[in-house]
Image (cartoon, grey):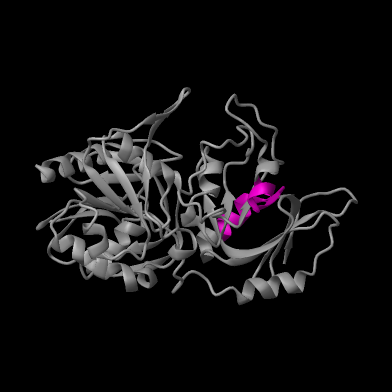
Amino acid sequence: MRISQDRTERPTTGRLVLSDGTVFEGEGFGQTGAAVGEVCFNTAMTGYQEILTDPSYAQQIVTFTFPHIGNVGANDEDIENASTAASVAARGAVVRAEVTAPSNYRARADLNAWMRRRGIIGLSGIDTRALTSRIRETGMPHGTIAYSPSGQFDIEALRAAAAAFPGLEGAELTKSVTQSSPYAESEGAWSDQGFAAGREDGPHAVVVDFGAKRTILRCLVAAGARVTVVGPSSSAEEILALSPDGVVLSNGPGDPAATAQFAVPMIKGVLAARLPLLGICLGHQLLALAIGAKTMKMPQGHHGANHPVKDHRSGRVEIVSMNHGFAVDAASLPAEAEATHTSLFDGSNAGFSLRNAPVISVQHHPEAGPGPQDSAPIFARFVSMMATSAQ
């Protein structure tokens, strides 16, 4: 099936070809070539640069439901991949309207040029409503996004590439978007004067980088922590040797059950040390696996900055950012786990604590980047837990 808009006689330069042979025609931008991945949609109205550089989007093609993309341009401050090993996160971007010129005082480049430098393929002029509806009805398909200035494509080859894509179930991707060497993060909150410097005497947080967003690190610094980042394969012994006052399990890409093969022993070791522990997104899922719960692949996932989540302790409904294609099976949580947050979109688990350990664990992104900051106080709460533990 071929889905296209009304065009002139000039050949269109972009394609999205799904594994079942469905073809979406549009105009290419960004990097030329072809890339294969899982096609998802994101409902955020802002923050396309942060989304495209979030390592959690490794091996994914992002469809933006908001039609107008490009008007804030791109800059160096809003890049989210914390590791120097992750030069790119998302493999492609699909948008409805032609990319607009930047109109923002922070812009240092237009989106087209920025994506070309980052190696991200773009496709505009697509009926993103039809694609989003398809994903909602049938799940996230495998697809090949392609940009050829000549307008010439081997559709069957692109379809075959999409069909051969192994998918994200069973995929361990954290090592491909992180670096193993420890480093310190000292940047805090951003203002027009730049990023504020962190404290040198705050409680020490060791962040296990499974694909960490830079804003998570900056939020910890802004809340008063000293931050050291270590690689995903770090052992509990290596982490404890750094004398942390608390440990953070970051977000990241891939199947948590695959990453759990080497991460769960580390998490169990940190839990045994009774240190405050904060899990975010993939870190939340890994923590659940470490205590005996299960995770599962979601049909369409949660990707956006407008997700309502209920905090059972306060009774408040928070609007949060989410980006995950796997979820914790709430029914599998053991007795020592208490569900603290629930997605009001589908009732899936969005957080838990442990009755016998100092743990905060959330599926959503309290750092936002992009999105609302309703759940940002989690960072101050965690830093307070570390300060108390250090006494």
Q: How many marks?
A: 0
Percent position (x, y) of residue 114?
Answer: 65, 43
Q: Is residue 124 magenta?
A: yes
Question: 378 or 223: which is nearer to us?
Answer: 223
For image coordinates 21% across by 58% down, the residue present is: 240
- Pick the quarter of the image with the C terminus: top left
**Residue 354 sits in which quadrant?**
bottom left
Q: Residue at x 32, y 37 (%)?
A: 221
The quarter of the image holding the N terminus is: bottom right
Q: Is residue 169 left or right of residue 355?
A: right
Drawn side of residue 283 relative to residue 314, left or right: right
Furthest-right residue in view? 9
- Residue drawn at point x = 51 percent, y = 38 percent: 78
175 up-or-down from 312: above or below: below
- Residue 320, can we see it? no
Looking at the rendering, the stretch of residues picked out in magenta corresponds to: 115-134
Between 155 and 281, the one nearer to me in the picture: 281
Q: Nearer the viewer, residue 192 or 341?
A: 192
Is residue 213 visible in this depiction of the protein?
A: yes
Q: Is residue 357 magenta?
A: no
Residue 56 locus on image (x, y percent): 46, 56
x then y, percent, for residue 369: 44, 40
Quarter-of-image position of residue 241 = bottom left
Residue 66 position within the rendered picture, expressed as x and y whole percent measured from the top left = 57, 42
